[in-house]
Image (spheres, rainbow, N blue to C red):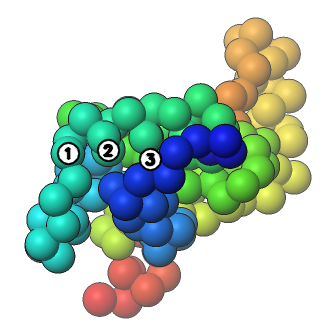
Amino acid sequence: MKNEYKTRSRNAIFDYLKENRDRSFTARDIMDTFSSQGEEVDKSTIYRNLERLCKEGRLISYKDKDINGTCYQYSDDNKACNCHIHAKCSDCGKIYHLDNELFKDVEKDLKDKYGIDIDYGKTIIVGKCSDCSKS
């Protein structure tokens, strides 16, 4: 987002992303948060910024069939999140960055048996984290 005009709304969106870097969220989550704080941010501004950040590699997006929508995860100022698999807690939404060494055999088998290359940036394993399992 360099050489861009920084608006108050854009800064608020970016602050939300940084504060929620360890969990997935939807555009609706952002809108609801701003609304609850009395912030006026246009829906199109949120979607436009999310789309731009996805193109820049600063956000990962994936479809979530459970909510029938797109989820996002902030990946800071690098594209490293496109290089490893993620796990997401189905209860709290926390995102875990997994070591690809765990998946080397699976990756090879998928390629050898089915001709499939893993798209790490869009690969999410869903389960329940240890904190939520205790509840």
Q: Residues within 10 Å of mark 3 (few under 14, many from 20)?
A: many
Left or right position of 24 against 58: left
Assign the N terminus to one quadrant of the image. Answer: top right
Q: Which residue is mark 1?
A: 42
* Residue sitting nearer the eye, 114 or 78: 78
Label 3 or label 1, whichever lies nearer to me, is 1
Residue 93 picture location, percent across and down: 39, 65
Q: CA distance from mark 3 to mark 1?
A: 18 Å
Disc tally is: 3
Mark number displayed over residue 61:
none
Callout 2 secondary element? helix
Residue 14 picture location, percent across and down: 48, 60
Question: Quadrant of the rendered structure where residue 31 is?
Answer: bottom left
Q: Which residue is mark 2?
A: 46
Amino acid type, label 2: Ile
Q: Are marks 1 and 2 in contact (CB under 8 Å)?
A: yes
Q: CA distance from mark 1 to mark 2?
A: 7 Å
Q: Is residue 124 above or below residue 98?
A: above
Amino acid type, label 1: Asp
* Residue sitting nearer the eye, 71 or 55: 55
Q: Which residue is mark 3?
A: 72
Question: Quadrant of the rendered structure where residue 63 is?
Answer: top left
Label 2 or label 3, whichever lies nearer to me, is 2
- At x 43%, y 86%, the residue is 131
- At x 12%, y 65%, the residue is 35
Q: Would residue 62 be seen by someone viewing this image from the given angle?
A: no
